[in-house]
Amino acid sequence: AKEQGRGVYHIFSKGMEEALKERVQLEKDVRQAVVNGDILPYYQPLMHLQENRLVGFEVLARWRHPVRGDIGPNVFIPIVEKLGLIGDLTYDLMRRACKDAGDWPADLTIALNISPLHFTDPLLPIKLLAILSETGFPPHRLEIEVTESAFVTDFDAARTTLSALRDLGIKASLDDFGTGYSNLYSLRELHFDKIKIDRSFVQSMQKDKWSDKIVNSVIDLAKSLGVPVIAEGIEHFGEMDEIARRGGEFGQGYYFGKAMPAALAKAMANGRTAN
Ligand code: C2E
Ligand code: CA
Ligand code: CA
Ligand code: CA
């Protein structure tokens, strides 16, 4: 058993060394990808549920690693943050998105995710404005999405950012509502323009009564505050139907379409059909 134990230890430590090397390499590759502009904006349709109409797209970052294939943003975004490059990536994605969407139908919005780490950067509003001017994209068509982890530490900074954005005509959604720390508090303190119901609730609402009640209550809460909701992660007709019947305005999910490259988003925007 002792022999075996040592063998296992050896393999284990070798595995750790390998993993560490891989990690270092991945960080290098992520840095390269950001610098080279290899991380691209994809576009997931946002639908008006009552009217079954496309209203815009959420920008989602996509990266195809030359060797390892597609790597998801849940993996590379934290690395980009750690490398201190999240501002660069965000502005790059925004610039591309504003260019891509420049000739799409004029009423469609673009929703950009802002990293919590970046949200309270005092330069953010000015930088967004600069990119809007540079690309000629109208501010009222740009929305940003942020999770509350951005401001649990600094509500004053968050308030300042939000009001600066509002002055520019940029709307802000509270992302992943229902998860995290104190999102009712965030809502009360910061008065978001939209609430995105986290997909974990939407996806279990058909099999779990509690999720179902929570989704319905968030819709009611939003209604009473006069704030529209977006239900994330709608994969089936049943979820869409229930949320729409309850009065939920907007929705997003594989039922309507996954994130797609600009050319496909443009075709969808012009055809105005969900597939
Ligand atoms: P998020 O902002 O909550 O984005 C929604 C995520 O849900 C996306 O995952 C989207 O592909 C996925 N999704 C949408 N509909 C469905 C559905 O019906 N079923 C399922 N199973 N999933 C669905 P994705 O693209 O992997 O992004 C994950 C997270 O990474 C995002 O969550 C966001 O927090 C972050 N992220 C993505 N792009 C960016 C970006 O450009 N900047 C920043 N800061 N974060 C980003
Ligand atoms: Ca989002
Ligand atoms: Ca979300
Ligand atoms: Ca999320």
Image (spheres, rainbow, N blue to C red):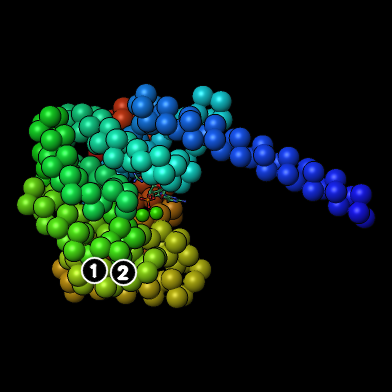
**Residue at 44% from the left image edge and 42% from the top image edge:** 79
Q: Which residue is mark 2?
A: 183
**Can you see residue 99?**
yes
Classify residue 233 by image quadrant.
bottom left
Residue 162: % across, % down? 16, 56
In the image: residue 264, left or right of residue 211? left
**Residue at 67% from the left image edge and 43% from the top image edge:** 16
215 is higher (above) or lower (below) than 254: below
263 is higher (above) or lower (below) than 228: above
3 is higher (above) or lower (below) than 267: below
Question: How many marks do you count on the picture?
Answer: 2
Q: Are marks 1 and 2 in contact (CB under 8 Å)?
A: yes
Q: Secondary structure at mark 1?
A: helix
Which of the two residues, 246 or 84, is positioned nearer the viewer here?
Answer: 84
Q: Which residue is mark 1?
A: 187
Residue 211: % across, % down? 43, 71
- Quarter placement of the N terminus: bottom right
Q: Secondary structure at mark 2?
A: helix
Badge 1 density bin: few <14, some 14–19, many ≥20, Cα 10 Å:
some
Which of the two residues, 177 or 236, is positioned nearer the viewer here?
Answer: 177
**Residue at 26% from the left image edge and 68% from the top image edge:** 186
Kind of residue sitting beneath label 2 = Asn
**Residue at 28% from the left image edge and 48% from the top image edge:** 118
- Quarter placement of the C terminus: top left
In the image: residue 183, left or right of residue 194? right
Badge 2 density bin: few <14, some 14–19, many ≥20, Cα 10 Å:
some
Classify residue 177 by image quadrant.
bottom left
